[in-house]
Image: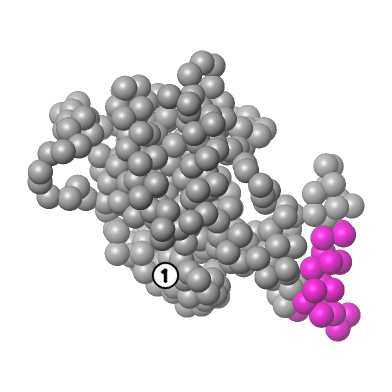
Amino acid sequence: MVNSISADIISRRAAKVSAPGTVGAMPKTGFLVFDTESIPDGELLARVKYPHDRMTPEGAIEKAQCEAREQSKDGSDFLPVTFQVPIAVCVLRVAVDYSLQGLACLDAPHFRTPEIVRQFWRGVGHYTEARLVTFNGRGFDLPLMELAAFDHGCSARDYFFNSRNRFQGKHLDLMDWLTNYGAFRLAGGLSMMSQRTAGGSPPGCGKLDVAGDQVYEMYRAGKLQAINDYCMFDTIDTYFVFLRTRVMIGELTGEIEQTLARKARNWLERKLEELPALATYLAAWDRLHPE
């Protein structure tokens, strides 16, 4: 269950947000919002599932996907996380006052899996007081990165000792929380929550030009930058959904959320030279947030 925060802490956070020009020390990093993209590990599939077939990695993936489609109720060929490897990890660093501090797609522009994994766990190890924030991270993103830590021999002592408790750990899975810890299926996922509104503006943008089931074919076509751009957009949407959940539990008011959203949009605009793909996200944002 999300830990309660005392009223004096809330008021101090609100004061920081409502007075953006205040001179003082940079607020501490309080949250690491992140998302991942992955592809099937063909070599592992060939070794484990088809050891006697002398299959190529590509052939093993094709066969495993075919079997998955046959067994799936909806025809999905997505393979279990145990047979996936990360090819994109984007991290949004957020201060304790919920303002944005940094945005990175790890190991850009090379996007090499071993280095992505090492950078991720070094970052988690550095920001030991920060809380990880994901959307379905408990069910996919963190198992993906934990298995990758196993593969590449990465250490993350504080995380494995202190962060994995479902209710009191240093990880907030927004999907887990929104579904009352798995009480119902959240059809539509992050994209739906990013566009959900009953008046006013939705918290985010939702899916733009890419969906998760396209990632493997994009990878085969060498479109690593486009995959990381897609991952970055989902990471930003996760941040805006996170803000709305903080309104729900009383850590933020609606007015402060709106102030933070405007500040975040301006902050992202200042990142355009460094991350030109943000122009696509900001154009979608402006269509959905005309104010």
Which quadrant does the C terminus fall into? top left
| Near-viewer residue (182 or 123) | 123
User: Which corner quadrant of the image does residue 41 belong to?
Assistant: bottom right
Residue projecting furthest to the top:
199
- Which residue is found at the position 89% from the left and 52% from the top? 70
Up the image or down, 232 lies above or below 6; here it is below
Tell whether 195 sits left or right of 29: right
Up the image or down, 251 lies above or below 242; here it is above
Q: Main secondary structure of the magenta part?
A: helix
Q: How many marks?
A: 1
- Which residue is found at the position 75% from the left and 62% from the top? 217
The local secondary structure at tag 1 comes to helix
User: Which corner quadrant of the image does residue 125 belong to?
Assistant: bottom left
Q: Position of residue 162 (x, y in %)?
A: 35, 55
Tell whether 83 sits left or right of 252: right
Q: Looking at the image, can residue 241 be seen?
A: yes
Q: Position of residue 177 (x, y in %)?
A: 49, 34
Q: Which residues are magenta?
A: 47-67
Which quadrant does the N terminus fall into? top left
- Which residue is found at the position 17% from the left and 33% from the top? 19
Kind of residue at badge 1:
Gln
Q: Is residue 244 magenta?
A: no
Q: Please name the residue that numbered disc 1 is placed on.
A: 119
Label 1 Cα neighbours within 10 Å, binned few <14 / some 14-19 / many ≥20: some
Query: How is colour applied across the structure in the image?
Result: one colour
| Near-viewer residue (153 or 101) | 101
Q: Is residue 59 magenta?
A: yes
Tell whether 31 sits left or right of 17: right
Residue projecting furthest to the left:
24
